[in-house]
Amino acid sequence: MPQLAYVDGRIVPLAQARIPVEDRGLQFADALYEVAAVLNGRLLDWPQHLIRLRRGLAALFIELPISDAALTLQAKRLIAANGHADAIIYLQVSRGVARRDHGFPANSRASLIMTVRRFDFAQRIAQQRTGIAVITVNDMRWRRVDLKTTGLLANVMAKQDARAAGAFEAWLVGPDDIVREGSSTNAWIVKDDVLITHPLSESILAGIARAALLRLAAGAGMTIAERPFTLAEALAADEALLTSTTAPLLPVVTIDGCPIGSGRPGPIAARLAALVWGDIATQTGWQAPA
Ligand code: PDD
């Protein structure tokens, strides 16, 4: 079955999906995106993704001429047409197509594209058992990374540094030595049974998986601190972990080659991972293959 994409109201074969050269997403990264998980054919935390998208659109004065209900219907149509039980859906809204000029065009219509890719969530369960490595790099991004714009070049360079170092992720560190987040994930540490993550601000993305983990950890009675932590603190932590839509919870066992805690996935990460996959099962009915 050919892969299918949604382009401004039409579902077309991915290989034939096109956008105009003067789309502002292409020329200025004047665009926002979302990535949501589909497990067992069902969307995970979809309302939260829509809320984040709407907030970003409002902040950038982009009007998306489609209701949440209609957008949801189109997303579900594309998911069903692609036919993958486990997948990620990518959605991008740009300010539209107009003659290249930095200021907003007088009459442009926001454009919407969506793609769906098969995704193997079970691989994350295997990685959870071994843990993953992260490296650190300077955070070179602009100051409004709470907006999920497609301007991701600093994230791209950071991820490539991680890959070149044989690591899963790069943590982005500010000039104050604060660990902000990963190139495509949120960052966490555990110290003395307290779960610590950077507070919401303009210098991190409000991850949907982050919000889910905060809710689940609070529900389980864990002590949580939403506060900045330094790289030195992370290196001295008992455990470290990361979260995202495509990596719901992974234990971090080394940072820049230094083992964290025992250097193996710790008990709190295991407990939190069980909560996260339990929530996914409740929402979608997804079960890890035995
Ligand atoms: N990345 N921080 C950054 C910089 C991100 O790009 C992402 C998501 C996250 C985690 O957010 P969420 O829990 O909503 O996935 C944090 C997506 C998956 C991506 O760019 O592919």
Image (spheres, rainbow, N blue to C red):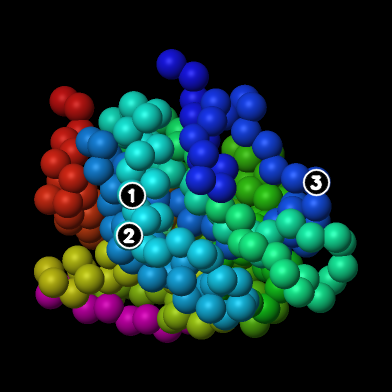
The residue labelled by disc 1 is: 73
Part of the protein shown in magenta: 221-228
Residue occupying the point 51% across, 82% down: 201
The residue labelled by disc 2 is: 69
Above or below residue 57? Residue 77 is above
Residue 154 location (% of width, % of height): 71, 59
Q: Earlier in the sequence, mark 2 or mark 3?
A: 3
Name the secondary structure under disc 3: loop
Asked if residue 72 lies left or right of residue 200, the reply is left
Name the secondary structure under disc 1: helix
Asked if residue 62 lies left or right of residue 86, the reply is right
The alpha-carbon separation of the residues under discs 3 and 1 comes to 28 Å
Residue 24 location (% of width, % of height): 74, 59
Q: Mark 3 is on which residue type?
A: Val
Residue 150 location (% of width, % of height): 64, 58
Q: Mark 2 is on which residue type?
A: Ala
Residue occupying the point 31% across, 63% down: 47
Q: Are marks 3 and 1 in contact (CB under 8 Å)?
A: no
The alpha-carbon separation of the residues under discs 1 and 2 comes to 6 Å
Name the secondary structure under disc 2: helix
Residue occupying the point 50% across, 69% down: 205
The alpha-carbon separation of the residues under discs 2 and 3 comes to 29 Å
The residue labelled by disc 3 is: 21
Q: Quadrant of the C terminus?
A: top left
